[in-house]
């Protein structure tokens, strides 16, 4: 098969973990008799520097054409003086997600056995933890009207019933394939958008009588995620709460550098990206953990190309690397970003 996808390395550690994931994809394609057809394009700060815009037309056109996008990370201190949609995050990543209508961002938290000791949590809290956060990705406070006026600054949070309903159905459909439980996270004691969120979730749940539904306020959820993380199966939440809770969830798994994600819409287009950012504090030093990016690449093979065995081969090789301690410093190892990728690549087998 010809695996044609759009590759957007971005900024900071994005190109480092990105290149490493390509090493692994290349080895996988060779082992399974496929070819890679990579369309590399600029996004974020790198695109601002070279093209004067965070999302050049050809980047968007390629993403639309291939429908499969592998993205590193965007942003960094170099572009922090910029405002609004001139920024790498708003004008690059958020607009791309919006234009492709990738409203469902799926972020798994299932600690690898050999990483239990890397988490700051006690091991007894982590055994059996296996949940997925379904984060709404194209609405809410990220996309509402924002600005400054003589009273100060504002960011409007807005959700339509349609936006809530479609992400809720995603979460319930996913729960059907797992342990059958949805935990909806909101702030309905304060926010009107959260009150609507809860009403719509309750209504949609009537179509899924076999799925258990619970509602949790986001502040309490931040605590429950640490005290009883194994109670959760599918966690459904809005854009900003999902952003914050998944960084917290990454620490159950040992590092920000091991959690991949898929951003999906109603059609077949998918974007695959680690949950971490461009990590300016370690960029350019070969210290970045490439596992989240490698697992994102595996997810792309499975979901956008139907290559299940290939994805599994990568996931198995990653697990072997973790078991063998062939890891970067964030997980207590001494390998560089590229060395981890090479180790994984060498262990991908049919
Ligand atoms: P970050 O996720 O980049 O880093 C947070 C901490 O985790 C840092 O100490 C970093 O060194 C560490 N870390 C992150 N990824 C790692 C990896 N793969 N291996 C080892 N350690 C890792 O978050 P931040 O520092 O708050 O943000 C930095 C920049 O990234 C900002 O400009 C932000 O807007 C951007 N950002 C982009 C994305 C994205 O493109 N998807 C996501 C989050 C943040
Ligand atoms: C993420 C990031 C982005 C988000 C930023 C960079 C806009 O933090 O993908 O988690 O908040 O969605
Ligand atoms: Mn984030």
Image (cartoon, rainbow, N blue to C red):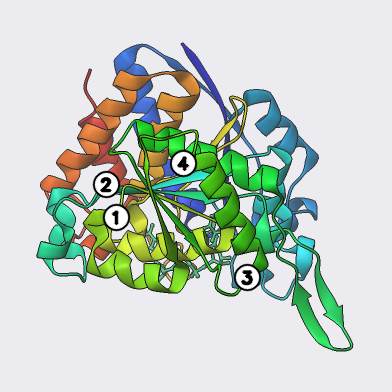
**Closer to the eye: label 3 or 2:** 3
Horizontal relation, residue 57 to residue 3: left or right? right
Q: Secondary structure at mark 1?
A: loop
Res 162 → quadrant: top right
Seen in the picture, residue 252 relative to 68 is either above or below; the reply is below
Q: Of residues 248 and 169, which is closer to you in this image?
A: 169
282 relative to 174, above or below: below
Q: N-terminal of the two: label 1 or label 4?
A: 4
Q: Do tag 4 and tag 2 residues touch (Cβ < 8 Å)?
A: no
Camera-nearest label, 1 or 4:
4
Q: Circle 2 sits on which residue?
A: 340
Which residue appears at 36% of the width and 51% of the height?
259
Q: Is residue 121 visible?
A: yes
**Residue 322, x across and y down, in percent:** 17, 48
For marks 3 and 4, give the one nearer the viewer: 3
Q: Residue furthest bottom?
A: 151
Task: Tell me the residue that label 1 is attached to.
Answer: 336
> What is the spatial separation of the Cα atoms under label 1 and label 3, in whole angstroms?
45 Å
Q: Secondary structure at mark 3?
A: loop
Disc 1 versus disc 3: nearer the observer: 3
Residue denoted by label 3: 191
Regarding mark 2 in the picture, which secondary structure is present there? helix
Residue indicated by mark 4: 171
- Which element is circle 4 on? helix
């Amino acid at each position: 098969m010809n695996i044609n996808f759009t590759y957007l390395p971005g900024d900071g550690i994005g190109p480092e973990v990105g290149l490493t994931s390509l090493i692994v994809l290349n080895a996988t394609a060779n082992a399974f008799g496929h070819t890679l057809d990579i369309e590399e394009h600029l996004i974020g700060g790198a695109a601002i520097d070279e093209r004067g815009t965070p999302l050049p037309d050809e980047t968007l056109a390629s993403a639309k054409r291939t429908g499969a996008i592998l993205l590193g990370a965007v942003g960094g201190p170099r572009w922090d003086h910029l405002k609004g949609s001139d920024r790498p995050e708003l004008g690059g990543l958020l607009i791309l997600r919006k234009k492709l209508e990738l409203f469902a961002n799926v972020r798994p938290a299932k600690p690898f056995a050999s990483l239990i000791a890397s988490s700051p949590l006690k091991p007894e809290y982590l055994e059996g933890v296996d949940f997925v956060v379904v984060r709404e990705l194209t609405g809410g406070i990220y996309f509402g009207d924002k600005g400054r006026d003589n009273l100060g600054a504002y960011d409007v949070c807005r959700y339509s019933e349609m936006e809530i309903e479609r992400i809720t159905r995603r979460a319930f459909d996913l729960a059907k394939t797992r342990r059958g439980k949805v935990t909806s996270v909101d702030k309905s004691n304060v926010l009107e958008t959260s009150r609507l969120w809860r009403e719509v979730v309750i209504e949609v749940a009537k179509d899924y009588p076999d799925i258990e539904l619970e509602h949790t306020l986001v502040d309490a959820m931040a605590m429950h995620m640490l005290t009883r993380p194994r109670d959760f199966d599918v966690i459904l939440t809005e854009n900003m709460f999902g952003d914050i809770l998944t960084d917290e969830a990454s620490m159950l798994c040992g590092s920000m550098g091991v959690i991949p994600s898929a951003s999906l819409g109603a059609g077949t287009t998918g974007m695959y990206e680690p949950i971490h950012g461009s990590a300016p504090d370690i960029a350019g030093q070969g210290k970045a953990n490439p596992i989240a990016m490698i697992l994102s690449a595996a997810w792309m093979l499975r979901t956008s190309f139907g290559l299940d065995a290939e994805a599994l081969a990568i996931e198995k090789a990653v697990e072997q690397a973790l078991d063998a301690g062939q890891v970067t410093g964030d997980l207590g190892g001494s390998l560089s970003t590229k060395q981890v990728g090479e180790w994984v690549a060498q262990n991908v087998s049919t």
